[in-house]
Amino acid sequence: MMAIREDFQRARSDHEKAARRVEILDAAEDLLLKLGNERFAVSALAARVGVSKSTVFLYFGNKEEMLLAVYERAFMRAFRQLGERLTPGMSGKAFAVAFIDSMIDHPSLLIVRAQLARTIERNVSLESLVSTKKRLLECGTVVSEKLDEVMDLESGCGKRMVMALVNLAAGAVQVDSLPYVDAKAVPQEIADLLHTASIRNIFMDGAEFIFCGATGRSFG
């Protein structure tokens, strides 16, 4: 069994324990971005941090609770960034660009979301699930209400639209092969298809339908 790192052994205060937890989350997110959901393993994470698997589980109940924490952190960061980019009178297209840019800047959000309901939320405690959902709802509500205000939308329209766009972005990332294929090494028609099916292009096409349907306004 791998020895526990001495600095992890010395963690006694809540502040020290919180710092160790953040270090594990940072390593988990980095590994997730490199390997994806399917190949992500706690053993590889433990090796990266330099601790045993049992040490990881001192900070998270199981793999799914850790991934849920990764998702929550990425969600909070992405939505705070989105909130900062909302400006009065912005067009639907400008909002959609701000939205997808905020999601792409925090890619672990979309990677983990693909497994959220199917695997992760089924394997965490009810207490963890409920407390996480409450925090996500609070963060999302703040941004959605600001969206209603800056775009002069009917109350609640922003929340429905944001939820639809998150799901659209999560679906789009599942069919985007561009990050994993050298477009210069394939025939031009295949390269063109890969670009057409990129997360940004798929998202923007769908976002136009969602925005126009939700608001009755033009996108541009």
Image (cartoon, rainbow, N blue to C red):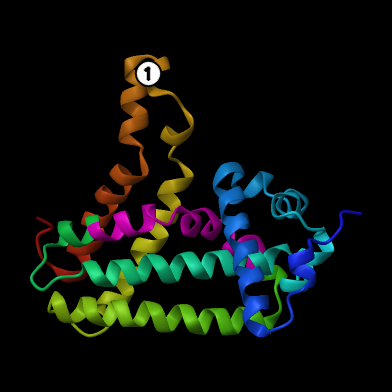
Measuring from the top left, give residue 171's x and y in whole percent: 44, 52
Instruction: Name the residue: 57% across, 59% down.
Output: 26
Measuring from the top left, give residue 18's x and y in whole percent: 62, 76
Which residue is at the front of the view, 89 or 69? 69
The type of residue carrying mark 1 is: Lys
Which residue is at the front of the view, 148 or 76? 76
Measuring from the top left, give residue 8's x and y in whole percent: 75, 68
Magenta stretch encompasses residue 102: yes
Instruction: Name the residue: 9% across, 60% down.
Output: 218
**Label 1 environment density (alpha carbons within 10 Å; few <14, some 14–19, many ≥20):** few
On screen, residue 149 versus residue 110, left or right, reads left
Instruction: Name the residue: 66% across, 61% down.
Output: 119
Name the residue carrying label 1.
184
Q: What is the quadrant of residue 143 in the picture?
A: bottom left
Predominant SS of the magenta segment: helix
Residue 60 drawn above or below residue 208? below
Residue 1 drawn above or below residue 24? above
Measuring from the top left, give residue 141's x and y in whole percent: 35, 82
Would residue 99 be visible to someone looking at this image?
Answer: yes
Q: How many marks?
A: 1
Instruction: Name the residue: 58% across, 63% down.
Output: 116
Task: Report the span colored magenta.
Answer: 98-121
